[in-house]
Amino acid sequence: MVRYLRYSLIVFLFITGCAGIPVRKEVKEDRSLPVGKIEGSAFEGIRFPFKVSLPSPQWKFSVEIPDFMEGFGFKKPGLEESELFLINPTTRSNIQIDLTPAGRRARFNQRMIEGITATAYNGLVEELKMDHGRNFQIEGSRPAPFPLKGIQYTAHQFVKYKVGETRTIHGWVYGFTEPYQIFIIYIVLEKEGFDDLKDIMKILDSFEMASKK
C-alpha cells in the first residue's frame, strides 16, 4: 500500500494541471535549514513557519521516520516528505505533518480542498478493501472544514476499521494558506488506558501557522 504517496500524487496531479496566470512568486523549500527547534513540549518550525505542542509526556516529537511506520503501509519515499512526526511510542498512534509550497498558478478554495480530501478518502477505502476483502467493514466521515489556526482553507476526513482485535482510526487534514499546502495525517491505534484520539485533537488544536508570502 502507498497511502501517503497516493495523497501526495492526487494533489500534485490536480494542482499541476491548473492553468492560468501566476498568482504568487515561486517558493522553494530550503532543505539546508533545520526542520525546527524543540523546547519541552513545544515545537517551532524553522524551515516552515508553524508551531505545535504535545498533549502529555506520553507523546514525543521526531524528525526521523519512526521504525513502525512502514508496517502501516506507508512507503519510505513518501514518509521522507514529512517534516515532523508526533508519536505515542507505547501505542504507536502518530501524526505526520508535511508542508509543501504551492505552484505559482495554483488557485484554492474551500470546495476544491474538500474535493481533493474526498478523493483521497475514496482511494484509501479502495486500498483497505483490496487488502481485507470487499466486505471489510469501514466507518467513514464526509469531508468537512476543520479549524486550524492560521489556515485559510481546510478539510478533515477519517475512516474507522478493525483488523483482528485492533481498532484503528485513520484521518487526515488537508489545507492551504498562502503560499503552502498543509498535509496532516494521523493514525490512532486504540489501546486500553489511552485516549489517543482525544490527544490528537489537542495536538491539532495547538497547531498554528503563520502566513508567509
Image (cartoon, rainbow, N blue to C red):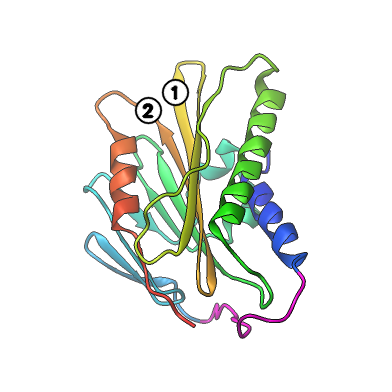
Label pair 2/1, CB-CB below 8 angstroms: yes
- Which quadrant does the N terminus fall into? top right
Most foreground residue, 29 or 177: 177
Tell me the quarter of the picture where residue 48 sits: bottom left
- Side of 206 relative to 122 (left or right): left
Seen at 45% across and 64% down, the residue is: 152
Local crowd size for mark 1, using a 10 Å CA cut-off: few (<14), some (14–19), many (≥20) = few
Seen at 50% across and 32% down, the residue is: 141
Q: How many marks?
A: 2
Seen at 67% across and 43% down, the residue is: 2
Most foreground residue, 191 or 125: 125
- Side of 99 relative to 190 (left or right): right
Q: Residue 205: x percent and y percent?
A: 30, 53
Provide the residue span drawn in magenta: 19-32
Circle on res. 167: 1
Q: Mark 2 = which residue? A: 190
- Side of 83 relative to 4 (left or right): left
Say whether residue 48 is magenta: no
Q: Amino acid at mark 2?
A: Glu
Badge 1 element: strand
Q: Residue 156: x percent and y percent?
A: 48, 45
Badge 2 element: loop
Tell me the quarter of the picture where residue 149 sits: bottom left
Q: Residue 78: x percent and y percent?
A: 63, 55
Structural distance between the alpha carbons of marks 2 and 1: 6 Å
Earlier-in-chain disc, 2 versus 1: 1
Seen at 66% across and 43% down, the residue is: 119
Q: Amino acid at mark 1?
A: Arg
